[in-house]
Structure formats: structure tokens, C-alpha cells
Image (cartoon, helix red, strand yellow):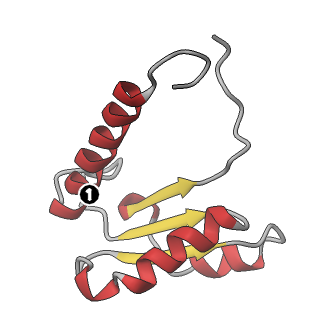
Amino acid sequence: MVDGEDVMPKVNRVLQRMGEFAHEVRSGSWLGYTNQVITDVVNIGIGGSDLGPLTMCTALKPFGHPRLNMHFVSNVDGSQLRDVLSKVHPETTLFIIASKHLPRRKR
């Protein structure tokens, strides 16, 4: 309950959508903008927005899909991003921008 509202139905819907999206990326049915299969995923985040996904991907790497290469950018100075961008192709790369402080829609 948040402010008297049961938020669990919304949380469960988002979790279901996230699971479906992850399945589509892993299965190859989610395509890049030129209709090519995603081969690389770049997570851009600082602090917990980087460490959580990095830790999870490291721990679960033996169970990962061999086609998908994970990359992590955790520094805002640009050199780390430049290094990652030199290794990936935009048409086959999924970029994730992770932040606790993204602008929110007003209710």
C-alpha cells in the first residue's frame, strides 16, 4: 500500500512487461532499427544503476545467451562510453539508460 493505494497490480504488470521484453531480446524477436537481431546491450548508469546490473550479469553469466554481449558504462567523462561505442554497432545494440532520477510524468 502506498498512500492508501494497492500498487501491487501495477508492479506486477510492469514486471510482466519487463519479462516479456527480456524474452524478446534473448530470443531474437526484438530487432534493432534496421531489423537486425540485437547482439550487444549497453547499460549506462552510475552507482547502483551500474553496480546492480553489473553484479547480476556477472553472477548469471553462465546462464546468459551466447549471442548477447553486455557492456557497462558508469563514468560521465566520456572515455568509457567512447571505448564501448568503438566495440558495438548501433543497428544491433540496445542501450539502457538506468537512473533513479529520470524526469517523471506528472499525475
Using residue 8 as the reference point, say whether residue 83 is left or right of it.
right
Q: Residue at x 46, y 61 (%)?
A: 90
Task: Indicate whether 3 appears above or below 32.
Answer: above
The extreme bottom residue here reads 62
Q: On the picture, is 89 further left or further right than 50?
A: left
Taking 86 as reference, is 15 above or below it?
A: above
| Type of amino acid at the residue the image marks with label 1 | Val
| 48 or 86: nearer the viewer | 48
Say which residue label 1 marks.
25
- Label 1: state its secondary structure: helix
From the viewer's perspective, tell me whether residue 21 is left or right of residue 95.
left
Would residue 8 be seen by someone viewing this image from the given angle? yes
Picture coordinates of residue 97 (x, y %)? 59, 53
Residue at position x 71%, y 79% in the image: 80
Point out residue 1 in the picture as x, y percentages from the top left corner: 51, 25
Going by the picture, which residue comes out furthest to the top? 107
What is the crowding at mark 1: few (fewer than 14 residues within 10 Å), some, or many (at least 20)? Answer: many
Q: Position of residue 86 (x, y in %)?
A: 57, 79
**Residue 59 locus on image (x, y percent):** 40, 85
Split into 4 quadrants, where in the image is the C terminus? Answer: top right
